[in-house]
Amino acid sequence: MTGTIARAGWICLAALVSFTAAAGPKPRARDLGVPFDGTPGPLNAITDVAGIEVGFTTLISGGAGDAAGGPQVRTGVTAILPRGKAGFDPVFAGYFSQNGNGEMTGTHWIEESGFLEGPVMITNTHSVGVVRDAVIAWQVKHGFVPRTSSAGRAWWSMPVVAETYDGPPLNDINGFHVKPEHVSAAIDGAGTGMPMEGNVGGGTGMHCYQFKGGTGTASRRVDTAAGVYTIGVLTQCNCGARNQLMVRGVPVGQEIPLEKRLLGGTGRNAAPVDVGSIIIVVATDAPLLPGQLKRLARRATMGLARTGSSSGNYSGDIFVAFSTANSTATQKPVASLTMFSNDLISPLFEATAQATEEAILNAMVAAETMIGADGSRSEALPHDRLKAIMRKYNRLKEPGR
Amino acid sequence: MTGTIARAGWICLAALVSFTAAAGPKPRARDLGVPFDGTPGPLNAITDVAGIEVGFTTLISGGAGDAAGGPQVRTGVTAILPRGKAGFDPVFAGYFSQNGNGEMTGTHWIEESGFLEGPVMITNTHSVGVVRDAVIAWQVKHGFVPRTSSAGRAWWSMPVVAETYDGPPLNDINGFHVKPEHVSAAIDGAGTGMPMEGNVGGGTGMHCYQFKGGTGTASRRVDTAAGVYTIGVLTQCNCGARNQLMVRGVPVGQEIPLEKRLLGGTGRNAAPVDVGSIIIVVATDAPLLPGQLKRLARRATMGLARTGSSSGNYSGDIFVAFSTANSTATQKPVASLTMFSNDLISPLFEATAQATEEAILNAMVAAETMIGADGSRSEALPHDRLKAIMRKYNRLKEPGR
Amino acid sequence: MTGTIARAGWICLAALVSFTAAAGPKPRARDLGVPFDGTPGPLNAITDVAGIEVGFTTLISGGAGDAAGGPQVRTGVTAILPRGKAGFDPVFAGYFSQNGNGEMTGTHWIEESGFLEGPVMITNTHSVGVVRDAVIAWQVKHGFVPRTSSAGRAWWSMPVVAETYDGPPLNDINGFHVKPEHVSAAIDGAGTGMPMEGNVGGGTGMHCYQFKGGTGTASRRVDTAAGVYTIGVLTQCNCGARNQLMVRGVPVGQEIPLEKRLLGGTGRNAAPVDVGSIIIVVATDAPLLPGQLKRLARRATMGLARTGSSSGNYSGDIFVAFSTANSTATQKPVASLTMFSNDLISPLFEATAQATEEAILNAMVAAETMIGADGSRSEALPHDRLKAIMRKYNRLKEPGR
Amino acid sequence: MTGTIARAGWICLAALVSFTAAAGPKPRARDLGVPFDGTPGPLNAITDVAGIEVGFTTLISGGAGDAAGGPQVRTGVTAILPRGKAGFDPVFAGYFSQNGNGEMTGTHWIEESGFLEGPVMITNTHSVGVVRDAVIAWQVKHGFVPRTSSAGRAWWSMPVVAETYDGPPLNDINGFHVKPEHVSAAIDGAGTGMPMEGNVGGGTGMHCYQFKGGTGTASRRVDTAAGVYTIGVLTQCNCGARNQLMVRGVPVGQEIPLEKRLLGGTGRNAAPVDVGSIIIVVATDAPLLPGQLKRLARRATMGLARTGSSSGNYSGDIFVAFSTANSTATQKPVASLTMFSNDLISPLFEATAQATEEAILNAMVAAETMIGADGSRSEALPHDRLKAIMRKYNRLKEPGR
């Protein structure tokens, strides 16, 4: 129910709303007839990879609709738990920075060890610190032992926290409104099932191709000689210039030019080139080694590129990939593992690019128009116009086709 | 004239043909009505960056049309000279490996020093060694001093040589038909002007999206607050699966499914996923530092992605970018430089992605059908069908529009 | 004066002490007769590089000597300001992770842009977040514009914060005792002049080769064809196993075996291999480009190696180097720079290794014995024994020699 | 027998000598009383790792002692076969470039795939190409299938070939005297057993710390909770300035200053800073994943640093590490592997540093004085003086102690 309220977007006045409820009947990109290649999982979401839990804390207060006044807050926290709340065993992981104008903490250890030893958190740029330390406090409180290095006792933790920028007019980013309890709430509220999309969690106040952006997800099932595996993607999308936007190759951004009256007329959104960032989290149950997961992370770039971005200078485009397989990987002294053959890996690359592309478009389709503190508007991608443009280019998948 | 002969492709029996002649009236991708963003330079080629010289040695002998018999040879050498034959001063450079199933020698020093100290050579996979040592011999012979480290005397050289695979049935790659004299010929024959495209130089025996591939080039002019700069790209394209091919977002590869009778029915081209490699060379006259050039190289991935590839496991997708500015960079003890502001660099990123995309399509449009030693065919991308498909998706730029 | 109190170490009960005062008459490594190569700057400190300011907040409370009781706090914050408090213009920078079992935030942007855009902060492992966000708050409060990307206005900041681990028994790390005001105090109190060493700032509760460790600094002046330049190093040293310790090649660690009764008898310090981390900050006024600074950072490993460490699995050995030259580097649209020739750079490499080695030994010589909450002791390196051992191996530089 | 002749060094006139014979009674560093930590394997050589074969081709002709005249040739080829001649199955591998002023081909694929798919070859700087292509020819000839990508058939190969520089006056490097048959001979002649050291193979004409250098090897056995594993190192050492040389911390280089009359009076050896390169190959039978092997490679730097080098600008210091475990790693579709726990890996790091340090010193102890074409001398490290200096610093391990 809180989920429903939150989906109303900017008029929601709740100070703290944590979501794990299933998504409502809002259409997603493919529901609108956008054609995609490949086969999605049952939810078409990162949670199609078994065991993954996702939670959000969405902070919406102040602004035009809030009688209580105060600064306009439109931000939040997203938590992705590779093995769920009950299983903080490390997962193999790799990361890639396509354009490092952003932060993702904890990557030195991912690169060094090949392990991700806790959740992946996403928030706004200026709240990375509070989220990081709050994850540690949560781990300490719950007695989790996030380190392979520990002999039954947690010594230290170096959480993975990423961000994109939701500064004014949408969010009072320098008010530091994310607090430790919001972090706990996102983790504690995480669940399997369909994650919410659009203006939720860390993605609440984000833009994408100068439309309203936010959180999106998608998945692909890949049938290989080793069995069927799933690739799941979750993105917090805050990147791109309007004229760059391509939807399955159709120049949608050029068909819907940026209007001067919209958010960004004098600010960031008016920039002629791509500004903003995108965080992409790739998950799989295929037994990939850390180096193979880095290869997957590098394919997120290719999905992003197909939506039009060329990773502008001001865009923090940092991607992390992990595998829930090999739960035995921290066995001592020697662990038994399985490794997916490089010879069969190309379809996983393609699936990563496909799911990334769809997750970005899902974020945009789900996001709803948000009004800034100065009255400017971050407009949602208009579904009807999108369909009309896709039809113009003979790329709309009509119902029943 | 030799150029014209060579353009006839596989029926040419010349044992050694070195090209620098201007291209003939063959259409390029935009001549067919493929719509592109951005503004190309006068030649729409890497040689729009002043001072760059390009040379090819194309080896075509044996095979169906060759009365003399012998193994079928369809290979060659491409030479890109950043400052031309007369100016081997180092240039700032950076490289990026999107998928390292390939070779590009000399990259350790590019990464370490930020300098490219000689030509970029491209050949077939099994001829990298002979080309490398032959470049050194050429440098020794001509008294060039390719090292910043030398005090007026060449001590050593570590040439940059890249490759893609042109193995049977098109080329007898294990016959090692590239010889040192072919390397000298490519360098000595290099010139400014429009480089040839298609079945020439190192690209002679290559495939691209399971059509005939090869060598392609394109450029963009970027108007910045610091003046107008050029981005030039040259690619040796040998990558991609048919069903992946997108031309400006249009699913051309899915519209022209791979026929069983074609080259690859039982070989590499029949693979369901992208196999093969692509080398992309990005050049600019903008005063970029080495780290900025690495950023450019990373955008070549984004141009490649827009043509459909997701950099399959067997694809060696390695990119190098260099700047002809800052010719004073090796001054001692302290050099005076200029540096293009990161704040203005995004349009150069976009231009790199655009020129890369167009160069790949130019390679495919220029390449001509080649018959393998076993009678199989590597079909050229059919121009008429391409136009028809682009029109079907309302993406053909009709003449006069 | 507060500085003097703090130097008394663990018996100091001050809740918050911020140091910029000059060091007292405590001996440093070379005062004891340890022989070093190369020529130090006037202070033999990172602040020999003009303009650099260093500040500390040292937190010492609770524990055996504290009548007020409470958990034992022995931790702090170190701030290194490349251009001082008044000059937050970016500096060229590069980083290197020798063993990434640690955190240094902000490195994605250093790697991408080549710039360090604010201070380098060092604290304990579980306080990285609070320090990070507090740096942003400080920047917001003071109206600094840390981004090259800003047009006269600060949009966002991604602070560089590193850490080593000072967990129990020395410090109640999970009590999260570092607060935002401690961060402000370290920055506001920063100054030129000789930084304090030993149990100060982020280094307060650290060990090094299973002796008491902490903060150390050193410098080298290098006479080159381009003039005299300075290399300065500051380290927060918390690494190494006792038996590894070498002092100028002399096996001091093997000569002073670890006693069971000391700190670590049942804890971390008893580990037979190197545990703990080391952060090394390298500064110079030589006009090095980002790639060259990364090269410098990689030489910090070599200085570390000469003290005996082999960068154990649990050691977060992450190094950052920056240059105060080229203050014009963020000029738009094109900046004028100077670049130190690679051909002359080797002496700067050697100076970096030398200053790193000496800074580590200075940290150990300055650090004073600290008693843990459980009564265990982290013993200081005994000066007399050190001298005796150096003499035994004919490596003591006797006074007057 | 030929081995014995070759050990006579520069007076040997044999045009082609391939060695696999066991070493003679020449002393090694520890035989002279140089004290080392850790426990070596039976041979104290890389071949203590079971299955590894090493072969050399040493080319010595021309020069003062050669009645036949001709240019002075002092060069060669070294071959390291991870699984011997009969087993070209890939091994897991990782590499690291401490200073990339050098070449090691094939590293893009090592980085991408985690596999080394053939031998590691080492030669002189200007013969990398011929060695590379000759390895392919050898693989083609012998029907080996070096690619994981191949389904029972070799498609392509990207050999790993590294180098250091042996230019005039010792070797006529620009005469390109290494030929394909020398490559075959090194591979075909490879064997288990003690490899030769000093002036052999690729190391024939090398210097080290301005003494005669060349090929050296060492090993360590590490007793872990998972069993006993071996670390083996082989180095081709050509780096360092005289005054930098440290032997177990003793400043031997400063005790034996460079004499003007020696080789380098007017050439490279007179340089005041470290010039030249070092290739280090680390092998183990511990089941390390590719990322863990990269960690090992990074520790080779630490062993190198302890001999005095700070990796000067002109030094190509590139290291590769591989594991002979996990012979099943290329199983399809999913391989079963074992992985050594990161928690236990530190002793392997220390062993790598130790074996690297000893291998370098072994190269210097084994190398014999060589006279250049101009009559200059590259002096061997004098054993008696080394012992006297070690004794002066109380670091000589006297016999019986």
Image: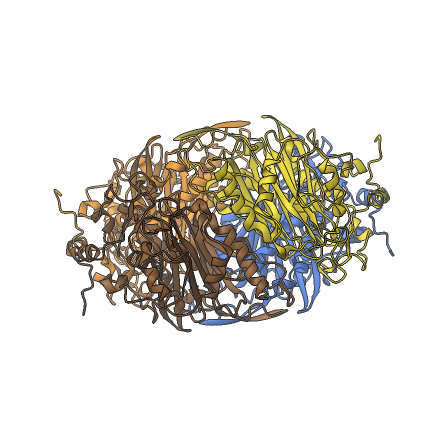
Chain colours: A brown, B orange, C yellow, D blue
Does residue A373 sit above or below B341 in this rendering? below
Q: Position of residue B205 (x, y in %)?
A: 32, 54
Q: Could you tell me residue A189's position as x and y percent? A: 45, 66
A333, above or below B49, in the image: below
Tell me if A69 is positioned left or right of D179 in this view: left
Residue name at image x 74 percent, y 40 percent:
C5
Q: In the displayed structure, would residue D333 be above or below residue A200?
A: below
Residue B293 or residue C202, whichever sits in front? C202
Q: Position of residue C217 (x, y in %)?
A: 68, 38
Decide if residue A321 is on the left or right side of residue D49: left
- State whether residue D307 appears in this view: no
Q: Nearer the viewer, residue D261 or D4?
A: D261
Above or below for A383 versus A190: above
| Quarter-of-image position of residue A295 | bottom left
Q: Residue furthest left?
A: B400
Quarter of the image that includes the N terminus of chain A:
bottom left
Q: Answer left or right for C210 relative to A360.
A: right
Q: Is residue B24 visible?
A: yes
Foreground pick, C272 / C269: C269
Tell me the quarter of the image containing the C terminus of chain A. Answer: bottom left
Q: Residue furthest right?
A: D400
**Relative to B169, is C197 on the left or the right?**
right
Instruction: Decide which of B334, B215 is in the foreground and name it.
Output: B334
